[in-house]
Image (cartoon, grey):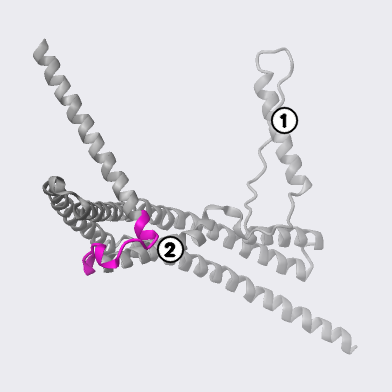
Amino acid sequence: MDSWKNIQASFTGLNIGQTAGKLAKTVNSSMQATKERLGAVAQDEITELPQEYKDLETRVDALRTTHLNLLKITKVYETETYDYPTQVQESLVELSAGFSHTVTSFAATNLKGTNLPVPSVAPPPPTQHKTLPHALARAASSSAIALGPEARLGKGLTLYAQATDKIGEARLQQDEAIRQHFLAPWQVTLTSSIAVAMKARAAVKNSRLELDAAKQTLKNSNPSRQEQARLEVENAEDDLVQKTEVAIKLMKAVLENPEPLKNLNELTKAQLLFHAQAAEALQAAQGEIEELSVAAEGEYRKSRDH
């Protein structure tokens, strides 16, 4: 029993010693970083990292900035209403239809098992997509109904409404494709491989600070501490070399990864398909609207001549 206690005490002492050693390194690194930030350390006393490492740092920073910059803009595709006119309000018909469906659904659910008659549930209102093309389609369609089916302008508006409704549906398909095949993987790259490389770089920086702090300790240590301080410098040098090699490997892997270029291709492809579908819908409608326009102008001029 006594021997077990002695072993346990030895391990406890070892753990305390390791913790104290780590704490001392952290304090020394923080002090070194502060001194460097304040310009209290000569440039030749700061360990120079390999040029290959520094070049890779610059390139990874550029890649990370690229991901962040595009995300700021393309995240708009996560919100359906990004181009919806702010001045458009829900119509009274739309609001009342939604209210009727909500009320009858609530009543049908809560009156079951009672002697009260259960009302039939009003059908839910059709989905009113909040995009600019859908808004144009609804405005053109309601205006065509108001003008009447025989009016040339009414016919033209119907054709335009049909085209813009197709464009609205194509835009929703584009947005979904961009969310799945660009935004999601683009975000994953930023939060996985790029983040791992950045973490490895932080480890290199911390290791470099520990080495330079150890060098300062060796420089200022008394003779009785010099051997131990020299050993700490050697260990810190080995640690820096190892961490730098790991960081270089990870940064190269990030820069060689073809995924971002594949994602960019998917973004471009989704936009191309949308614009092609939009052009096709508008081209078909515009030809017929032009015929109506020419006929209307001909009749107008003829009436003016008489």
Classify 69 as above or below 100: below
Classify 160 as above or below 104: below
Looking at the image, is mark 2 or mark 1 earlier in the sequence?
Answer: 1
Q: Nearer the viewer, residue 101 or 263?
A: 263
Q: How many marks?
A: 2
Residue under label 1, please give it: 103
Q: Residue at point 26% right, 45% down?
A: 25
Classify 250 as above or below 10: below
Q: Which numbered circle lies on residue 267?
A: 2
- Image quarter in which the C terminus is found: bottom right
Q: Quadrant of residue 11?
A: top left
* Residue 266 seen in this snapshot: no
Residue furthest to the left in view is: 3
Q: Position of residue 236 (x, y in %)?
A: 18, 51
Badge 2 element: helix
* Residue 221 seen in this snapshot: yes
Residue 122 colored in magenta in the image: no
Q: Position of residue 69 (x, y in %)?
A: 46, 63
> Which three-letter amino acid code belongs to the residue tagged 1?
Val
Badge 1 element: helix
What's drawn in magenta, residue-wise? 34-53
Q: Quadrant of residue 54?
A: bottom left
Q: Position of residue 253 (x, y in %)?
A: 24, 59
Q: Position of residue 65 (x, y in %)?
A: 41, 63
131 left or right, relative to 187: right
Whole-number angstrom distance, CA of label 2 to CA of label 1: 42 Å
Q: Residue at point 65% right, 49% down?
A: 128
> Which three-letter amino acid code belongs to the residue tagged 2?
Leu
